[in-house]
Protein backbone atom coordinates (compact mmCIF):
# COMPACT_ATOMS: atom_id res chain seq x y z
CA UNK A 1 0.00 0.00 0.00
CA UNK A 2 2.88 2.35 0.77
CA UNK A 3 4.34 1.77 -2.68
CA UNK A 4 1.06 2.86 -4.28
CA UNK A 5 1.03 6.03 -2.16
CA UNK A 6 4.66 6.70 -3.08
CA UNK A 7 3.84 6.16 -6.77
CA UNK A 8 0.91 8.59 -6.66
CA UNK A 9 2.85 11.22 -4.71
CA UNK A 10 5.75 10.89 -7.13
CA UNK A 11 3.44 11.31 -10.08
CA UNK A 12 1.87 14.39 -8.55
CA UNK A 13 5.19 16.03 -7.69
CA UNK A 14 6.62 15.83 -11.21
CA UNK A 15 4.69 18.00 -13.64
CA UNK A 16 5.66 16.16 -16.83
CA UNK A 17 3.09 15.11 -19.36
CA UNK A 18 4.01 11.42 -19.10
CA UNK A 19 3.33 11.46 -15.39
CA UNK A 20 -0.03 13.14 -15.90
CA UNK A 21 -0.97 10.44 -18.42
CA UNK A 22 0.15 7.70 -16.04
CA UNK A 23 -1.92 9.23 -13.25
CA UNK A 24 -4.95 9.51 -15.54
CA UNK A 25 -4.52 5.86 -16.56
CA UNK A 26 -4.27 4.82 -12.92
CA UNK A 27 -7.45 6.75 -12.13
CA UNK A 28 -9.24 5.14 -15.07
CA UNK A 29 -8.18 1.65 -13.97
CA UNK A 30 -9.39 2.30 -10.42
CA UNK A 31 -12.76 3.67 -11.58
CA UNK A 32 -13.19 0.83 -14.10
CA UNK A 33 -12.45 -1.72 -11.38
CA UNK A 34 -14.96 -0.14 -9.02
CA UNK A 35 -17.53 -0.12 -11.82
CA UNK A 36 -16.99 -3.82 -12.51
CA UNK A 37 -17.39 -4.63 -8.82
CA UNK A 38 -20.65 -2.67 -8.66
CA UNK A 39 -21.96 -4.45 -11.79
CA UNK A 40 -21.02 -7.84 -10.32
CA UNK A 41 -22.81 -7.08 -7.04
CA UNK A 42 -25.93 -5.84 -8.87
CA UNK A 43 -25.97 -9.00 -10.99
CA UNK A 44 -25.56 -11.16 -7.89
CA UNK A 45 -28.42 -9.40 -6.13
CA UNK A 46 -30.66 -9.80 -9.17
CA UNK A 47 -29.80 -13.46 -9.68
CA UNK A 48 -30.26 -14.20 -5.98
CA UNK A 49 -33.72 -12.63 -6.01
CA UNK A 50 -34.71 -14.56 -9.14
CA UNK A 51 -33.46 -17.81 -7.60
CA UNK A 52 -35.42 -17.12 -4.40
CA UNK A 53 -38.57 -16.51 -6.41
CA UNK A 54 -38.08 -19.74 -8.36
CA UNK A 55 -37.71 -21.73 -5.12
CA UNK A 56 -34.00 -22.55 -5.22
CA UNK A 57 -32.02 -23.22 -2.06
CA UNK A 58 -28.53 -21.87 -1.38
CA UNK A 59 -29.09 -18.66 -3.30
CA UNK A 60 -25.76 -17.34 -1.96
CA UNK A 61 -24.32 -19.09 -5.03
CA UNK A 62 -25.39 -16.03 -7.03
CA UNK A 63 -22.27 -14.25 -5.75
CA UNK A 64 -19.73 -17.02 -6.45
CA UNK A 65 -17.95 -16.74 -9.82
CA UNK A 66 -18.89 -19.50 -12.30
CA UNK A 67 -21.23 -21.08 -9.75
CA UNK A 68 -23.58 -18.18 -10.44
CA UNK A 69 -23.62 -19.22 -14.10
CA UNK A 70 -24.76 -22.69 -13.07
CA UNK A 71 -27.54 -21.16 -10.96
CA UNK A 72 -28.56 -18.94 -13.88
CA UNK A 73 -28.72 -22.03 -16.10
CA UNK A 74 -30.89 -23.84 -13.58
CA UNK A 75 -33.34 -20.95 -13.53
CA UNK A 76 -33.76 -20.85 -17.33
CA UNK A 77 -33.29 -24.46 -18.40
CA UNK A 78 -37.02 -25.14 -18.37
CA UNK A 79 -37.68 -22.16 -20.64
CA UNK A 80 -36.09 -23.66 -23.73
CA UNK A 81 -37.74 -26.20 -25.99
CA UNK A 82 -34.34 -27.42 -27.26
CA UNK A 83 -33.41 -30.98 -26.40
CA UNK A 84 -30.05 -29.86 -24.98
CA UNK A 85 -31.68 -27.39 -22.54
CA UNK A 86 -31.16 -29.78 -19.61
CA UNK A 87 -27.40 -29.29 -20.00
CA UNK A 88 -27.74 -25.49 -20.13
CA UNK A 89 -26.31 -24.96 -16.59
CA UNK A 90 -23.17 -26.89 -17.54
CA UNK A 91 -22.94 -25.14 -20.90
CA UNK A 92 -23.07 -21.74 -19.22
CA UNK A 93 -20.25 -22.63 -16.84
CA UNK A 94 -18.23 -23.97 -19.76
CA UNK A 95 -18.94 -20.81 -21.74
CA UNK A 96 -17.80 -18.61 -18.86
CA UNK A 97 -14.59 -20.57 -18.46
CA UNK A 98 -14.13 -20.70 -22.24
CA UNK A 99 -14.27 -16.93 -22.62
CA UNK A 100 -11.49 -16.50 -20.06
CA UNK A 101 -9.22 -19.46 -20.84
CA UNK A 102 -9.37 -19.47 -24.63
CA UNK A 103 -8.75 -15.74 -24.81
CA UNK A 104 -5.03 -16.54 -24.76
CA UNK A 105 -5.06 -18.99 -27.69
CA UNK A 106 -4.58 -17.04 -30.95
CA UNK A 107 -6.68 -18.59 -33.72
CA UNK A 108 -8.65 -21.55 -32.38
CA UNK A 109 -9.52 -19.67 -29.19
CA UNK A 110 -11.49 -17.05 -31.10
CA UNK A 111 -13.95 -19.68 -32.34
CA UNK A 112 -14.42 -21.02 -28.81
CA UNK A 113 -15.01 -17.48 -27.52
CA UNK A 114 -17.63 -16.82 -30.21
CA UNK A 115 -19.40 -20.08 -29.40
CA UNK A 116 -19.28 -19.25 -25.69
CA UNK A 117 -20.76 -15.81 -26.30
CA UNK A 118 -23.56 -17.34 -28.36
CA UNK A 119 -24.46 -19.61 -25.41
CA UNK A 120 -24.30 -16.70 -22.95
CA UNK A 121 -26.46 -14.43 -25.09
CA UNK A 122 -28.92 -17.27 -25.75
CA UNK A 123 -29.24 -17.76 -21.99
CA UNK A 124 -29.74 -14.01 -21.57
CA UNK A 125 -32.50 -14.10 -24.19
CA UNK A 126 -34.23 -16.96 -22.36
CA UNK A 127 -34.05 -14.99 -19.12
CA UNK A 128 -35.41 -11.82 -20.74
CA UNK A 129 -38.13 -13.79 -22.50
CA UNK A 130 -39.16 -15.32 -19.18
CA UNK A 131 -39.41 -12.10 -17.18
CA UNK A 132 -40.12 -9.32 -19.70
CA UNK A 133 -42.51 -8.63 -22.53
CA UNK A 134 -39.90 -7.40 -24.98
CA UNK A 135 -36.74 -9.50 -24.74
CA UNK A 136 -35.19 -8.48 -28.05
CA UNK A 137 -34.26 -4.86 -27.15
CA UNK A 138 -32.73 -6.11 -23.90
CA UNK A 139 -30.75 -8.70 -25.81
CA UNK A 140 -29.47 -6.00 -28.16
CA UNK A 141 -28.48 -3.86 -25.16
CA UNK A 142 -26.60 -6.85 -23.74
CA UNK A 143 -24.77 -7.49 -26.99
CA UNK A 144 -23.84 -3.84 -27.57
CA UNK A 145 -22.59 -3.53 -23.98
CA UNK A 146 -20.32 -6.56 -24.58
CA UNK A 147 -22.21 -8.55 -21.94
CA UNK A 148 -21.82 -5.97 -19.17
CA UNK A 149 -25.51 -5.14 -19.47
CA UNK A 150 -26.62 -8.66 -18.52
CA UNK A 151 -26.05 -8.31 -14.75
CA UNK A 152 -27.57 -4.82 -14.73
CA UNK A 153 -30.68 -5.99 -16.61
CA UNK A 154 -30.85 -9.02 -14.31
CA UNK A 155 -30.93 -6.63 -11.36
CA UNK A 156 -33.72 -4.56 -12.89
CA UNK A 157 -35.93 -7.54 -13.76
CA UNK A 158 -35.44 -9.29 -10.40
CA UNK A 159 -38.92 -8.36 -9.18
CA UNK A 160 -40.74 -8.83 -12.49
CA UNK A 161 -43.45 -11.40 -12.84
CA UNK A 162 -43.14 -14.04 -15.49
CA UNK A 163 -44.28 -12.80 -18.88
CA UNK A 164 -47.59 -14.06 -20.24
CA UNK A 165 -45.87 -16.40 -22.69
CA UNK A 166 -44.20 -18.25 -19.79
CA UNK A 167 -47.28 -18.87 -17.65
Image (cartoon, rainbow, N blue to C red):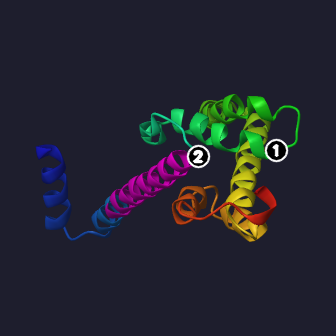
Question: Sequence-wise, which precedes: disc 1 or disc 2?
Answer: 2
Q: Residues at badges 1 and 2 in contact (C-beta under 8 Å)? A: no
Residue sitting farthest toward the front: 167
| Tag 1 secondary structure | loop
Name the residue: 36% across, 62% down: 31
Q: In this view, does 72 lie to the left or right of 115?
A: left
- Can residue 14 be seen in the rendering of this structure? yes
State the image coordinates of residue 167 (x, y, percent, origin top left).
76, 57
Q: In which quarter of the image is residue 100?
A: top right
Question: Chief secondary structure of the magenta span?
Answer: helix
Q: Mark 2 points at which residue?
A: 54
In reply to whether residue 52 is colored magenta, the answer given is yes
In reply to whether residue 83 is colored magenta, the answer given is no
Q: In this view, does 29 lie to the left or right of 154?
A: left
- Pick the residue in front: 60 or 41: 60
Question: Which label was assigned to residue 80?
Answer: 1
- Pick the residue in front: 76 or 136: 76
State the image coordinates of residue 130 (x, y, percent, origin top left).
72, 57
User: Label 2 crowding class (10 Å Cα cut-off): few <14, some 14-19, many 20+?
Assistant: few
Which region is colored magenta? 27-54
Q: In this view, does 62 lie above or below 22?
A: above
- Pick the residue in front: 157 or 91: 157
Q: Which of marks 1 and 2 is in front?
A: 2
- Pick the residue in front: 71 or 164: 164
Amino acid sequence: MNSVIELISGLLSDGSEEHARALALLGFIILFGIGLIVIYILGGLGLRRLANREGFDRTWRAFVPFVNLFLWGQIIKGQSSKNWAESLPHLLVGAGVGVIVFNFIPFFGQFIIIASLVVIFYAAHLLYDTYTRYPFPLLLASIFSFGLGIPIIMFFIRNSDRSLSQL
